[in-house]
Image (cartoon, helix red, strand yellow):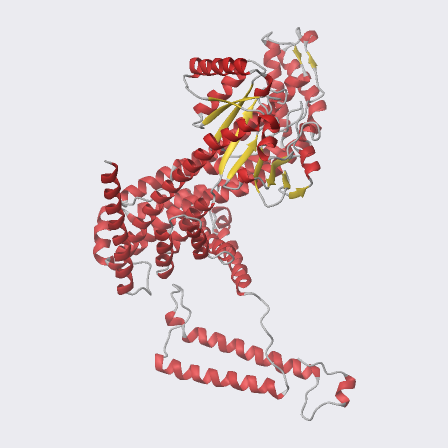
Amino acid sequence: MPEIGPEATQTRNQGELNEAQQRRLYVTCSYIDKLLVEIEQVLHETASPSPFPRHVIDITPAQARVLEDHIRRIREQLLRTLDWQQMKPESPEIPATRSVLTHLEFIDIAVEELKPSYMRGSGTVPTDAVDELTGVAHELRSVVQSMQRYIRQEFGTNLQSRLESLEQTGHDVALLRELEEIITRHGLVEFRSRIGSLAHRLEDNNLEVALFGRVSCGKSSLLNALLGTAVLPVGVNPITAVPTKLRFGNALRAEVTFGTGRAEEVSLEEFAQLISEQGNPGNARSVVRAMAEVPSPRLKKGILLVDTPGLGSLARRGAAETLAYLPACDLALVLIDAGVSLNDEDIGTLRLLYEGGIPSIVLLSKADLLREGDLHRVTEYVHAQLKRELGINTQIHPVSSLPEYSLLLDQFFERELYPRFEQARSLREASVARKIGSLRDSVSAALETSLNREKRGREVISALDAHDIEARLRHINGEIGEQRTLLSQAFFELGERPDVIVAELAEMVTLRIASGEKRHFTPFEISEWTHDTVQRRIDEAIAGARSRLMRSIETLTEIAREMSRSDVPSNEDAELLLREVPRFEIEIIPVKIEAARWKWLGKRIVRALVKSNLRECLGPLLKDELHRYERALDLWTEQASRKMVALVNSYADAYRAQLNRVRGLSGGGETSPELAQDLARLLRWNSSERSDSKTRLAMNE
C-alpha cells in the first residue's frame, strides 16, 4: 500500500486517494472477502461431516453454483478496485500450520474443562460418572494430540520419505509403505502412529553395550582404547552416578543435560570435569545425562557404548544408578581386573545381569599385568568360579588398553561384538515384521468392515457389548491420561516436603537406638539412609505408574481378544517407557548422632532430639537437593507419560474406530471399488507371505 504524505500529495496522480483513504479502501475490500468466505462455508455445509450443523440448507446444488459465480464476480471487482489505486492484496504471512495448531490449543483447553474438577462448577458429578468423564476428556485429547504430532513431526519429515530411506538402507519395508498408502487413502488415522513407531524402531539401529565393573577396573581406559581417543577421564575416583553414552558422530563433540532439562554442548575438558567425581563431587552440578559423539569406525554401524559408574565404590549412588540402568542395556560387558582376584561384587553384578535377562560377556581387563601362563590360569579360575557360583558357562576374553595389546581388542570386536550386533539387528527386524503383519491384519479388518458394514455389524454387535467396550476404553484412557498428574503430584510433594523425609529418618534412627542395635551414627550412614528413603518413595510412585500401565495393557488385550484382533501392545513395549529414571544424589551430610548419653531417656524424647538434630544439619541441604531432583523428575515425567499415553492410544483408538465402523458411526467418502481393491491387495500379500513361509520351511527341512 503506497504511503501518501504531505509532500507526496502535491505530486499525486489524478484520482489518487490519500494514505488514510487507501487504508480504509483496502480494509473494506478485505472485510468483504472475509464475508464471502463465510458465505461459501454456508453453501458447502452439506458436504461437511460436522455433527453440529448451524444452518438448514434450503439451497439446491444448481442454485449454489450460481451464487458461487456471483461470488467470483464480486472478488474480481474487488481486485479491480485495488488496482485503480495501484494496490495489490498483501501476501499471506501466517502459516496454515500455525493457525491450525493455535485452534488445536484452544480445543485442548476446552477439552480440559470437561474434566470432573471443572464440571463440578455445574453441579456435583455423580460418582459413577467420574472415571468415564475423565476418560472422555482424555479420549478427545488423544485425538487432538495425534493431530498436533502429525503437524509438528510428519510435516517436517514425511513418513513416506522415511520409509523410502529405510528401504535404501536395506530394510524390507515394502508392506509398511503399502499400508501407509492405504491408511492415508481411506482416512484410517488411528493407525498412523503405529506406522510411525514401527519406522522409528527400524531407524533406531543401535546396539546399546554397557560396561560394568568395580571402581578402577579400567572401564574408561578400555573405552578410550577401543575408540582411539581420550574422551573419558581416567583415574582412581569413580565417575558420577550418570551413565555416559558414546555414539558415532562425524566430529568429536560432547553434550550434557542438567536437572533443569537444559541440554548444553560443552568442551571435552568441561565434559571430563562434569562426569568425574573429582571435577563434580556428589554431582553438585546435577548432570542427568552425558553423551559424547566420537568419529570412530567401530561405532559407525550403530554400536552405542555406555560407561557406567563403578560398582562397590564408596559412591554407593553410582552403584545404584548402574543397577537402575539395567533395563536400557542390550548387552553387558563385565570387566574383571586381572590383577585382583574374583570377588563377591563381580559375581553379584553378573547375577543381577543374569536375573535381569541381560546378555553378558566377561572381559578380563589389564591382561598386560600377567604373563601368558598366569593369564591362562586366571582365566580358567574365573571360568570355574562363575560356573560354580552362577551355573553359567561363559567364555572369558582377556583385553588390555595398552597399544601393544590392541590385537586383543581387535579380536574381541570382530569375533564377539560385531556378530552380536548383526544378530540383534535381525531379532529387531523379526520383531518389527511380526508387528507389521499384525497391523496388516487390523487394517484389513477395518477395510472389510467398511465394505460389509451391515452384515458384519450384526455379527459383531451380537457377540459384543459395544457400550461395555467403550466404557472400558474410556476408563483406561482416563487412567493413563492422569499418569502425568499423579506422578507430578507425588514428585512435587517430595520436593516440597523435606520434613517428611527428616521425620522418617528420625524414626529409623530412634528405633535402632531403642533396640540397642546402634548408638553411634556416621555422616555416611545418615547420607545413605537419606538417599534410600527418597529413592524408596520414587520407586513407589514409579511402581504405581507401572501397575496402571500394565492394567491398561491387560484390558486392551482382553478387548482385542473379544474383537478377534491380533494387534495388542506387549509388556516389553511398556517396560521400555519406564526406564532411565533420574537418580537422587546427595553429598555426605556433616551430621553425626552420638546417642550413648540418651540411653536412659524415653523413646519420645529421643525421637525429638534426633529430629531436631537432623532438621538443623540436614534440612537446608535436603531441601535444595530435592528441589533440583524434582526438576529432573518433572522432565522425565513429561516425556515418559507422553509415551505411555501414545502407546495406549495407538491401540485404543484403533479398537474404538473399528467399533464405530461396525455400528455405522464413522466412514463416509470411501468408494467400494477402492476399498475392495486395497483389501484384495492386502489379502494377496498375506497369502504370498504364507506361501513364502512354507517354502522357507520346506528348504530348512
Q: Position of residue 480 (x, y in %)?
A: 45, 42
Q: Quadrant of the C terminus?
A: top left
**Which quadrant of the view contains residue 54?**
bottom left
Visible residue check, residue 228: yes
- The front one of 80 and 121 is 80
**Can residue 325 be seen by looking at this rendering?**
no
Residue 159 in the image: x percent, y percent? 44, 55
Q: Quadrant of residue 227?
A: top right
**Res. 529 image quadrant:** top right
Question: How many numbered marks does the figure carry?
Answer: 0
**Percent x, y for residue 474?**
39, 46
- Looking at the image, the residue that sits furthest to the bottom is 14
Instruction: Tell me what residue is drawn at x 37 percent, y 45 percent.
Output: 473
Compared to residue 291, the image places residue 320 above or below, namely above
- Indicate whether 470 appears above or below 600: below
> Where is residue 233 drawn, in percent x and y?
66, 30
Residue at image x 72%, y 21%? 590
Q: Is residue 509 left or right of residue 566?
A: right
Rendered-image quadrant of the N terminus? bottom right
Viewer-side residue, 118 vs 289? 289
Q: Nearer the viewer, residue 343 or 696?
A: 696
